[in-house]
Image (tube, coloured by chain):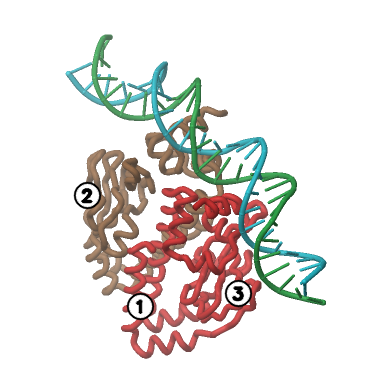
Chain colours: A red, B brown, C green, D cyan
DNA sequence: TATATTATTTGACTTAAGTCAAATACAGCC
DNA sequence: GGCTGTATTTGACTTAAGTCAAATAATATA
């Protein structure tokens, strides 16, 4: 993975470790652990993304529709934070869906609760800011991948950096995540 | 432009209008107005991006090198905030350059000063967060443009949404910004 | 103004990746 | 184990966009 992301991830972990008890308890008090059966939608297009989902177990994906086809935007595993960024930030209707690809257990925090908690615990503001920066770096990195590399290179990098994706997610989703057609992906895989 | 971005931009303006005098003065006190002659580099790859540049006048672009070629990542006009996101957020060496395409005047704020000002003025934290979210939405939107639309469509949308770019920026930069070759851009322009 | 330099266009050809259709392969279920 | 539906692969063909080379056009400069 992008070394900047790895670095920043560890900085976030470090920061979380320094949170005071009150802030941690506040977080805990607004967190609900929920489960979503395989195939269910954790967020639908048209809805406002009012929750953040921290995956405890299972796999999920975020996608949107384009000319009738589902285009996968992101694939989530354990510990990942799933939400529709634009919809969450602006509290406006989402264009994206979030779907449980397996049974999913997630720690769910409501937008309003988190906003309130931030007011009471300034440390959580800093955490919010760090998560935001992390996502910004992630999207930038992903855009660079898409712009700079060919379909084959993108697939190889996915293999190198996140091989578990290939093992656990249907190829259709991976293809659209990589921005290539299913057939092309199949051909890339068959070569060598 | 993306309606979400327009909306969020106005929210930021509104928020700025509510800043208390102390916060505004703090901002003012850490802001230096500087000028950069046409062709000069406001940031070089390898350097850490320690400043944010709010353009007062002129045009600038951010780019990186890929296989020896310059790839334009962003083009800045009056009022735009220029910085290398990843480098600024992590205070790590940048892969990007920021170049003044014309003589540029900018309000420059040093990273450290802003961090300090944020500690003293919590309102600035909120501003920082809003700017971050704005950038996140912008990058997401740009990535969607690149993924969903053909070269021709991307050019047309640029024409519709930001026609001033075409009038004031050499086509080479626009081509790489759109992720297409100069020749293809020229052909797209000549059709109709 | 003539000349050099840089920017843009045009032409000819190549190529990566897409599309549509059909064939296998695989998985869940009776 | 056989059957049904979904997932993946393979084949044949098309197409958007890239590349390389050369020709104009525009701009800056002596």
Q: Secondary structure at mark 1?
A: helix
Image height check: is D16 above or below D22? Answer: below
Residue at x 39%, y 67% (from the top left corner): A134
Residue C25 left/right relative to B112: right
Badge 3 and badge 2 in a common chain: no
Residue at x 40%, y 71% (from the top left corner): A131
Q: Secondary structure at mark 3?
A: loop
Tell me where residue A83 appears, x and y as whole percent: 52, 70
> Badge 1 is on which residue?
A13
* Image mark for residue A157: none
> Badge 3 is on which residue?
A102
Report in which chain the residue with disc 2 lies. B
Residue at x 36%, y 47% (from the top left corner): B76
Question: Is there CB contact under 8 Å for labels 2 and 1?
Answer: no
Report in which chain the residue with disc 3 lies. A
Q: Secondary structure at mark 2?
A: strand
How far apart, in angstroms, are the residues tagged by discs 2 and 1? 38 Å
How far apart, in angstroms, are the residues tagged by discs 1 and 3? 27 Å
Tell me where residue A170 appears, x and y as whole percent: 60, 64
Image height check: is A138 above or below A23? Answer: above
Work out which quarter of the rendered image holds the C terminus of chain B and state it: top right
Residue at x 39%, y 62% (from the top left corner): A137
């Amino acid at each position: 993975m992008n070394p900047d992301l790895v670095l920043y991830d560890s900085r976030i972990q470090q920061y979380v470790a320094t949170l005071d008890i009150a802030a941690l308890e506040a977080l805990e008090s607004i967190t609900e652990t929920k489960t979503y059966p395989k195939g269910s939608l954790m967020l639908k297009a048209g809805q406002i993304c009012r929750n953040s989902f921290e995956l405890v177990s299972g796999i999920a994906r975020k996608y949107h529709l384009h000319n009738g086809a589902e285009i996968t935007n992101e694939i989530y595993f354990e510990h990942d934070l799933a939400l529709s960024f634009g919809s969450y930030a602006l509290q406006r209707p989402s264009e994206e869906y979030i779907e449980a690809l397996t049974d999913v257990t997630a720690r769910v925090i409501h937008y309003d609760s988190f906003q309130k908690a931030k007011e009471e615990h300034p440390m959580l503001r800093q955490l919010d800011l760090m998560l935001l920066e992390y996502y910004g770096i992630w999207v930038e990195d992903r855009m660079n991948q898409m712009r700079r590399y060919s379909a084959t290179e993108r697939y190889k990098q996915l293999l190198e950096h996140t091989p578990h994706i290939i093992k656990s997610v249907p190829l259709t989703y991976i293809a659209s995540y990589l921005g290539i057609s299913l057939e092309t992906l199949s051909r890339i895989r068959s070569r060598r």
